[in-house]
Amino acid sequence: MDTKEHYKPIHFLLICLIMHQTFAFGSISRGKILCIRKEREALLEFKRGLIDEYNLLSSWRNEECCAWRGVECSNTTGRILVLNLRIGTIESNPDGPDKDLILTGSITSSLVKLEYLKYLDLSSNNFGGDGPIPKFIGYLKRLEYLNLTSTYRVFTGLIPLQLQNLTSLRTLDLRGNYLTVNSLEWLSHLVHLEYLDLSLSNVQAKNWLQQISKLPNLRELHLFGCQLPKIIPSSLILANISSSRLSILDISSNRYSSPAINSWLFNFTSLTSLDLSSNDLGKMASGFGYLKSLEHLNLFGNSIQGGIPRSLRNLSRLRSLDASNNNLLSQPFSELLDNLAGSNQSLEYLSFEGNALTGSLINLTRFSSLKELKLRENSLDGIFHESFRQISSLEYLDLSSNQMTGSLPDLEFFPSLTELNLRSNHFYGMIPQGLGKLSELKILDVSFNRLQGLPDSMGKLSKLKILDVSSNRLKGLPESLGQLFDLESFDASNNLLEGTISESHLSNLCNLKSVKLSSNSLTWNVSVDWIPCFQLQVISLSSCNLGPYFPKWLQTQNSYSFLDISLASISDTMPSWFTKLPPMLYFLNLSYNQISGKIQDLSANNIGSIVIDLGYNNFSGPLPTFPHLVSELRVDNNKFSGSLNSICKIRSPVTLDLSNNLLSGEIPDCWALMSVLTVLNVANNHISGSIPYSLCSSTSLSSLYVRNNNLSGHFPVPLKNCQGLKVLDLGRNRLSGKIPEWIGTKLAGLGILSLRFNEFSGSIPPSICQLQSIQILDLSGNHLSGRIPKCFSNFTTLRLLQDGSSVNYDFNPTAGRGILVYKGNAFVQWKNKESEYSNTLWLLKTVDLSSNELIGDIPNDFSRMNALLSLNLSRNNLTGNIIEGIGLMNMLEVLDLSVNHLSGNIPIGLANLTFLSVLDLSKNNLSGRIPSSTQLQGFDPSTYGGNIQLCGPPLPACPTFAPSNPHVVFDRTSQENDDDDEFPSKEFYISMALGFIVAFWGILGSLYFNDSWRNAYFKWLNGCQNWLYLSSAICFARLKAKLRA
């Protein structure tokens, strides 16, 4: 609530103005000159020290100074009583942005000659030049009102002690300056002072409260952001406070905690307005209940915990309470309101925004005088109770960003409502017809809900100015919308709207300034020669069907600052009149149409920063001249041809995307003044030459795409200075020579490095391992030779953290800076397909060294890149075995080692890669049985083709004599034990053969060659036969005898 209603000295000013209008001008009209010559000359001398850029003091010329702007005189004596040079700001400037109408320069001492001056207001100007307050002001002893307020903080240093001479002063306003207050002793002389504002000064006086309490007539005190020191007041000071007549106190933004103020604050029992916002109270003391005269209490942003104390029930006069942005979630909403029961009849303004309050919206009809209720950004749930609608006095209701659900109640019971905000809840169904009875409603926001329809009665809201129904499930718009004669802003974007928008919807909306219907399936059905009665400032019709012809009615719009007609099914030629853009335009989007033709010049008249997106059309011819303050320019995927030279006139681009055109020539050397350039994309053109040195003048450059052009020569040396690069794509050019050693040190921040399909030769420099943030490394399709460096494990983003997560790189450098978020892109071979990735680029982690002439083993350190998703080393001359640790790279989805000279068995661990979906080991010298697992047996036989010594599924079965590889078990800790249990094995067959030779020939050969052994053997054999026969006969006879018995 505005506390300036208590600002009594304003009454004095009004009286002076009335007297001036009634008497001074009456005297002038009779020809009498009131102005005293001495004082007139003093004002002219004062004017000579000023700089009046806007000619504000043009009236300071004639003889009658009492008629000059800001000057008022006594009707009887002619003495100057008032000098008011507070001009203010211009509200609307058709020639450009709104400007502050101010005076600058210095304040000269000639003002001392205005001996009878009572009212001096030099506020909101830019006097002083960072100097102190002029001491001579202290000699204007008749001053009752002094205002040196500054929005520019022009006065610095100490407050001059001479101000103590202003003993008649009633109002002293010094807020907004860089003043230092190390003493307030001088205040004791200003016994008539009623209003004091030292806001944003640095108050260092530890006895500030003591000095303030000595001012017997002080009614209003403002010490916002003064870094007030903490104090422990004496009993005498507390006595003075108790007798104080202070009514309004503002000590906001001083980082005070509850203990720091509890000892003295509650002695100001006459307070009617208390502002404690943006402190750090933590917990509210019960002492607030002593301030029984309090009408306005501001507790915004104090990290209050524990809720509102019950003592606030004593505040029966409380009219406004702002407790927004605290931590009141621990107190139930119902209890919180119970603690305000004492102000049921008086409370008019109540705000609990941003407190994470839970529970349902209970009955608030007890607050019979409530006019404004703000509960935005909490966690209130439940439905909109019918009983709630009985607060007939309510004018402002904000329940946005909660979790409320259900249908809306009949809103006709809020007859006084002027603003209703239900944004970002879960309301559904139709808006009730009773909405049409809210005759005072000016703002309605029900966006981001699940509402399905608008009532026909909406056309009766004759005072409605802002209507936002975006991001719902609306399927149609009522014809009655055309009766909202005062409507200024209409947003129905992101719905399910179908059908047509006709002239009947729009013909009566002559006050409309903003229309947003994007992301719907609407057709714009107006006559070719239709001339709307409105002048729009915002036009957002993306995804609406405006075509096939370019909308001619846009020619009648001269004031728009935002135009988005992308995806609008326009397949016409760009009309010549369209290039005369309005001077205030800051956003232009014609992308994703089929607009053709040549564009000559877009630079005329634009005076501010602008975003231009002409991408994905059929524009041809040379690049047009663009406004020199373009911040984002996208003309990608067109048919522009010729040189890039026209972009040299742009001075402050953040993003330049010229990719996928027919541009040719060299990249111009004109980048020195483009200090904020972040993204440059000229991929897929016919650009030749090399990278100019000035390109790296911008320390902000983070993404450079020159893919698929005709660059030649060695690796561009100027890139050594682009030390902020995150993305470097030089793929598919004709660059040659060695990859420089400095790439790892000068470009250490790279996340994407693509040099694919050039003519680079030599070895991969070991310094490349210093690219710790690299996420996509593509050196494929060159003539690189030598061994792969053994330090790839240094790539931090390609390794899992201890908790199993991984670090993903940020490829959206302009996110949060530009209006259009630029999504990085790269051309990557993924799962045997070459594609351009953009939206999911940040998820990819690949190393591609394929199609080179690399030799030697695969470094064992590769196994430490356990966050890698794709590894391609194919078509090289690599030898040795597949590394045993391959099974540790358990995030791999793609592994291509084909067309090399790798040998040995396929490691068992390869079967542990459960995410592996693409595998190619073909055309190597691998041997042995393919490890058994569902993973490896599921691939096509071509995966292992060209390895003639490999066998086992999915290849033909291994021969019976062929040794078998052990069955794969996914528990690595038990592999050794499982290997010991496997049967049959090679050793088994050897043992069986030796056993046969020893057992068979060792016995049979001895009997054959030795007669005595043979005779003895057969004699023993006959004896065994006789014993067996005799034993059997005896046993049989005994059994027979037992049976007979």
Image (cartoon, rainbow, N blue to C red):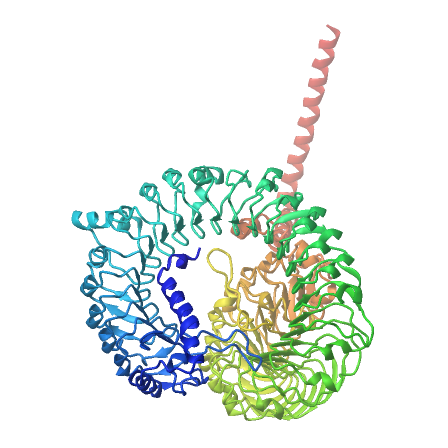
> Which residue lies at the image location 72% right of the left edge and 78% below the top edge?
556
Would you say residue 717 is visible in this rendering?
no
Residue most extreme to the top: 1045
Q: Relative to 446, is 296 on the left or the right?
A: left
- Vertical comparison of 956 with 692: above or below: above
Residue 808, percent from left and from top: 53, 65
Work out whether 176 lies above or below 222: below
State which quadrant residue 16 falls in.
bottom left
Residue 413 at least partly seen: yes
816 vs 643, left or right, is: left
x and y percentages locating residue 756 in the rendered image: 62, 81
**Which sits in the foreground, 602 or 349?**
349
Who is closer to the viewer here, 866 or 532?
Answer: 532
- Residue 859: percent from left, percent from top: 52, 71
Q: Position of residue 203 (x, y in %)?
A: 25, 64
Q: Which of the two residues, 304 or 947, is positioned nearer the viewer here?
A: 304
Most foreground residue, 734 or 994: 734
